[in-house]
Structures are given as C-alpha cells and as structure tokens.
Amino acid sequence: MSSKSLRSVALLTAGWLAVACQESSPTMPAEADLGLQSALTVDVEAAVRSGDPERAEALRHAATALRWGIRPSRIEVKIQNEQVTYLAIVVGVTRRGSDGSSVLVRSLVAWTGRPPTALFHVISASEQALFGPPQGNGNGGPDGARGQWKDLVNHQLWVATAGSADLELAATGNGCPNQPPDVRLRCVLATFDIRINGSFQLLGPGGPDGAPIEIHTNADGVHGVVIKPAD
C-alpha cells in the first residue's frame, strides 16, 4: 500500500474515536466504537485498492467530521421487509465542477450494531440523482448516485443498480467545534433530509449477480457538516 494510502487509513482511525449513539446535541463528545473504527478502516483500504478515490475520500471526510465532534443521527433503514435502526452522518464537500461552477458532493455514511454488522454508503454530486448500472469496479456513472450496502456478518457487498437518492441540504448553522487545519477551508454544521430508494445487487467476481434487494430510508434533519472554501 502506498504511503498516501497509509496516511488515509491513519486519518480514518483517528476520526472514528468520537463515534457513539445519537443525542439531542449534534456536537457532544462521545466514546469510541473500536469495532466501527476497524470496519471503516477496511472500507477505506478497499476503496483505495479498487481505484475509487472519491469513495475513500468521502469516508475520510465523514471520519474527520466525527473527530471534530459531530454526533450521528438515528435513521430507519428498510431492507426488503426488515426495518433496522442505523446511525448516520452526511458530509457535503464543495468542489468546482467541470464548468467552473460550485458543486456540493454529498455523502451519507450509516452503520448499525456494536460491533457493526452492516455499513451503508451513498454518494451524490447533486440533491437528486439516480442510481445506474455499475461500471468496472462497481462505480456508477459520473452524473449519478452511487450506493453500497455491506453485510459484515455474511461478508457480502451489495451495490445500487437502480433507484434514486435524494440528499437535500436542509440547513446550515454555526461553525464546527473544530476547523480544518487547511486555512483555505471552513466547516459548518448542517442538517440533511434524505430519501434513498434503491435496488441493490450482490457484487460477485464478475459484477452484480443474482436477484436484487430493495433498500429504503427516509429521514429529516440528519446531522452533518458542509466543508467549503473559507470566505
């Protein structure tokens, strides 16, 4: 693994030291969840190995937000006919689009269990986007949403192949309790309204395989942050 990848994993490890269950305040300190820390470290390593820097970076940003003291929210995730409570955080990162305009890339990271039994991740560069057929290493098209659900108990990875992802920035507030070390960036507290309705297929050696499963979640006011250029 490259030195850059090792640094990324180290940042992730530090980031998850602040994770715990939801409270009314979005920024209270929390005890460490070492099982979650380990699971997310594996996910970042997998993203790096598969040549998916966008996913690895999104996971690192979520870890950093938690390290800054952002407390996750509880959401209900329905997988087929079973509804499970997950903890979740949404991170928005402002980037420059190909035409020079400002684009907010949003990333939902959610997990359940202690130690975690499942990880759920959706990333989109727009408020409303569609999941599409995976290409190559499981990535969706550049203008669509991408989603993964990882069953840690059965060692299965499911990828979104159809459906929609709405990750709406509902509000922004005060500055984060800690700020990025890069003075060119600023972190502000935020809440997001999420609507995920996706069809996910098991990822096998040759790509998606077998019958899909349906995954849905609808939640308002999910805790998160927006990282943007400093004024």
Image: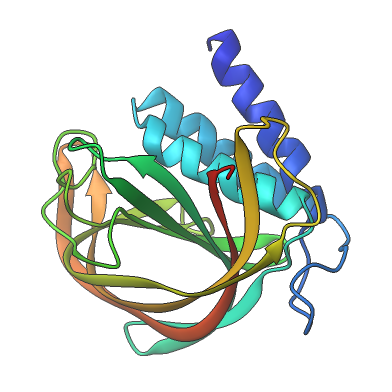
Determine the image quadrant of residue 95: top left
Number of disc labels:
0
Quadrant in the picture for residue 99: top left
Residue 66 place in picture, x, y as percent: 71, 54
In the picture shown, does residue 90 fall above or below 207? below
The residue at 59%/65% (across/down) is 224
Q: Is residue 210 left or right of residue 16?
A: left
**Residue situated in front as seen by the camera: 62 or 86:** 62
Residue 119 in the image: state x and y as whole percent: 51, 59
Q: How is the image coloured?
A: rainbow
Going 69% across and 32% down the picture, which residue do you hit? 11
Seen from the viewer's position, the closer of residues 18 and 215 is: 18
Q: Residue at x 46, y 88 (%)?
A: 83
Of residues 13 and 187, the one nearer the viewer is 187
Q: In what quadrant of the picture does the C terminus appear?
A: top right
Q: Residue at x 41, y 24 (%)?
A: 49
- In the rendered image, the residue lying farthest to the front is 231
Estimate the x, y position of residue 175 in percent, counting from the top left. Answer: 71, 59
Query: Is 204 rendered above or below residue 7?
Result: below
Image position of 6 (left or right of 16): left
